[in-house]
């Protein structure tokens, strides 16, 4: 599995070319999304139990019995929504792939977003363990975390370009356009989420 995930992250064209020749299997994409869900729950628990949420910019939800299920299901809801957007865009470009194939490969492309779920807890730990650090250092760390967030979202976009190109047999430029639209929507949501305005999708 390690070599398969390594190829996914660093050689997505070869990875998705192979996937289009294999039987559709949602198990590994579902595991990728589930790991993001579990990390989200763990992050919310640690934040709510041990850390001060007042200063955190990347976390606006703490874990409670009432929102447990919401936090658990958010990555899966996002997976379905992103798949629907990709499927609609690719059909607009006369794509040939099925919804279930799009679901599978959108899930694979979400691997960097799963890694991204670690950022809030890093933010929380740094903020709470270094309350007396110089403001400029804290500001610098905040910028680094923001850049990491953008980097991992763009990385997923990069994977989705090849996922959609191979899944739907569309031109590379059209696959790029589809990924750019989705990434901009995700970045826009993440900005709104960070500001605490809405909290419907994972970030």
Image (tube, rainbow, N blue to C red):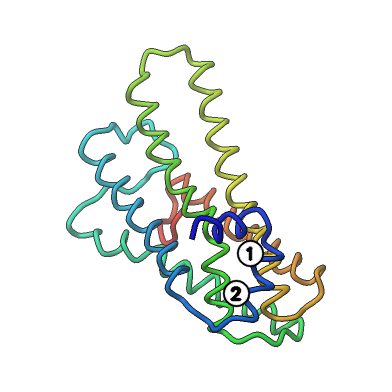
Q: Is the residue 133 above or below the residue 15 in the image?
A: above
Q: Secondary structure at mark 1?
A: helix
Marking on residue 182: 1
Q: Secondary structure at mark 2?
A: helix
Count numbered badges in the picture.
Answer: 2
In this view, which residue lies farthest toward the left?
65
Asked whether the residues under the numbered discs 1 and 2 touch, taking CB atoms below 8 Å apart as contact, a structural biologist would say yes
Q: Residue at x 56, y 84 (%)?
A: 99
Neighbor class of circle 2 (other Cα within 10 Å; few <14, some 14-19, many 20+) is: some
- Residue at mark 2: 85
Using residue 6 as the reference point, say whether residue 127 is left or right of it.
left
Using residue 96 as the reference point, say whether residue 121 is left or right of it.
left
Q: Residue at x 53, y 61 (%)?
A: 110
- Picture coordinates of residue 40, whole percent (x, y): 35, 52
Marking on residue 55: none
Q: Residue at x 24, y 50 (%)?
A: 63
């Amino acid at each position: 599995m390690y070599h398969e995930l390594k190829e996914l992250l660093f050689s997505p064209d070869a990875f998705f070319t192979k996937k289009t020749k294999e039987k559709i299997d949602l198990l590994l994409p579902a595991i990728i999304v589930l790991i993001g869900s579990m990390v989200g729950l763990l992050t919310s628990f640690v934040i709510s139990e041990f850390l001060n949420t007042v200063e955190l910019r990347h976390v606006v939800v703490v874990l409670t019995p009432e929102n447990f299920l919401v936090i658990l299901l958010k990555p899966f809801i996002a997976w379905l929504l992103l798949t629907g957007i990709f499927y609609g865009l690719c059909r607009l470009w006369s794509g040939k792939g099925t919804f279930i194939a799009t679901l599978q490969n959108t899930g694979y492309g979400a691997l960097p977003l799963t890694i991204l779920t670690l950022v809030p807890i890093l933010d929380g730990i740094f903020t709470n363990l270094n309350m007396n650090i110089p403001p400029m250092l804290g500001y610098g760390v905040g910028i680094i975390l923001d850049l990491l967030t953008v980097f991992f979202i763009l990385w997923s976009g990069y994977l989705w370009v090849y996922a959609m190109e191979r899944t739907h047999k569309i031109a590379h430029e059209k696959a790029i356009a589809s990924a750019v639209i989705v990434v901009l929507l995700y970045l826009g949501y993440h900005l709104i989420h960070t500001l605490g305005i809405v909290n419907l999708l994972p970030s």
